[in-house]
Image: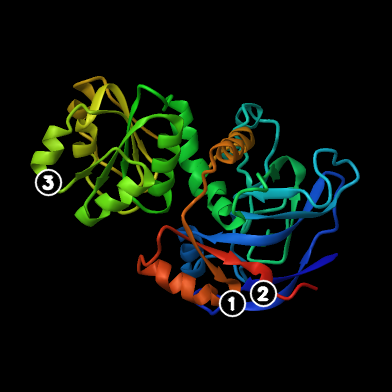
């Protein structure tokens, strides 16, 4: 077995501590990745607080690094290649979703980067707050080496989550995209929509974020608690990406959609209440999406390499993981924490 050093929590709400872990010996189609940076996502925070979860737990599911070894049948990667991996490391490869390149919707459920079930030996996967990860080659992506690696890491989770709907609903020149919420998802939605050539409006409850939205490239900002401003924005967007994670009323957002517009709910994944008339008037649609498939993930990385787009991050030495989690829990981040794992001892 291969050995790595990782940050592990032994129980819910227990402190993370560096510890040796084992990685599997490489299968024929495996790639070993020496991890340099890994993002800190709200889902990591939730997993660490989940008393019903599986422990011990090594989090981390949006990471970058370099190839350190390859299996005998791997032809698309070589030792030293700059790579990136997201929250999926395997899938059944046979269902209709996998056949469409949407392994994130695998009918047999994809193998998650951590807390997942290995499809060969049934073991639980450990995440990438670690010096090394072993991944099936189909789920490893070529990374533009000229981009800041810390800024690339969140593209593999937050970035792909907003990229797929932008592609699905044709964001580009002549389209009007609204982005609700200017956090980890939202700031990337703004950057990518602008880079695609769309006209972008940010909807926020915080007037002070107007300057941030403009700095990210947004063309205008609407304060969503201002009834007059929202009324004036009626019918002004073809696509709205709702990136707010807390429960909220969707009716005002549906009203800013133009004829045949779509509201894509990406942040809050719980139950919602929608009046049919809010959909009927203007023939509007309510949709959702999550994560992304392998084909679109590589497309996103290639696009970001061409346009020089990365996430706005605060990179911290991995020894400060506790600080990152505490600040994330109270919303003190702009817009994503990324752990620099170079300070973690390598076996």
Q: Which mark is residue 226?
A: 3
Residue drawn 63% across the image and 40% down it:
108
Residue 42 is at least partly visible in this image: yes
Dot 2 alpha-carbon crowd within 10 angstroms: few under 14, some 14 to 19, many 20 or more:
few
Q: CA distance from mark 2 to mark 3?
A: 47 Å
Question: Residue 124 appears at what percent x and percent y?
Answer: 68, 60
Is 106 above or below relative to 213? above
Give the quarter of the image for residue 330: bottom left
Which residue bears the numbered disc 2? 343
Question: Residue 290 appears at what percent x and percent y?
Answer: 48, 41
Residue 121 is at least partly visible in this image: no
Q: Looking at this rendering, what residue extends furthest in the right direction?
A: 72
Q: Which mark is residue 319?
A: 1
Question: Residue 303 appears at what percent x and percent y?
Answer: 57, 35
Give the quarter of the image for residue 197: top left
Q: Looking at this rendering, what residue extends furthest in the left direction?
A: 228
| First along the sequence among labels 2 and 3 | 3
Give the quarter of the image for residue 279: top left
Residue drawn 80% across the image and 73% down it:
347
């Amino acid at each position: 077995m291969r050995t790595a050093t990782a940050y592990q929590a032994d129980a819910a709400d227990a402190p993370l501590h560096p510890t040796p872990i084992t990685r599997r010996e490489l299968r024929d189609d495996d790639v070993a990745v020496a991890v340099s940076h890994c993002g800190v996502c709200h889902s990591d925070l939730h997993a660490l607080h989940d008393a019903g979860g599986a422990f011990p737990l090594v989090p981390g599911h949006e990471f970058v690094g370099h190839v350190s070894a390859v299996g005998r049948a791997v032809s698309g990667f070589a030792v030293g290649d700059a790579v990136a991996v997201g929250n999926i490391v395997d899938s059944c490869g046979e269902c209709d979703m996998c056949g469409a390149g949407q392994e994130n919707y695998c009918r047999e459920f994809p193998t998650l980067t951590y807390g997942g079930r290995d499809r060969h030996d049934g073991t639980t996967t450990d995440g990438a707050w670690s010096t090394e990860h072993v991944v099936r080659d189909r789920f490893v992506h070529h990374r533009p080496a000229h981009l800041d690696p810390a800024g690339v890491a969140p593209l593999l989770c937050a970035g792909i989550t907003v990229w797929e709907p932008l592609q699905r609903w044709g964001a580009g020149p002549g389209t009007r995209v609204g982005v609700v919420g200017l956090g980890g998802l939202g700031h990337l939605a703004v950057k990518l929509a602008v880079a695609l050539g769309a006209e972008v409006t940010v909807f926020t409850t915080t007037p002070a974020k107007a300057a941030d939205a403009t700095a990210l490239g947004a063309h205008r900002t609407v304060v969503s608690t201002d009834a007059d401003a929202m009324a004036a924005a009626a019918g002004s967007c073809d696509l709205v990406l709702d990136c707010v994670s807390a429960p909220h009323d969707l009716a005002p957002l549906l009203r800013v959609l133009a004829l045949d517009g779509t509201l894509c709910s990406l942040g809050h994944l719980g139950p919602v209440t929608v009046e049919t008339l809010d959909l009927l008037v203007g023939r509007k649609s309510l949709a959702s999406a999550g994560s992304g498939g392998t084909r679109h993930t590589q497309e996103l990385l290639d696009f970001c390499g061409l346009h020089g787009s990365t996430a706005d991050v605060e990179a911290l030495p991995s020894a400060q993981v506790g600080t990152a989690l505490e600040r994330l829990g109270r919303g003190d981040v702009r817009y994503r924490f990324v752990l620099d794992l170079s300070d973690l001892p390598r076996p």
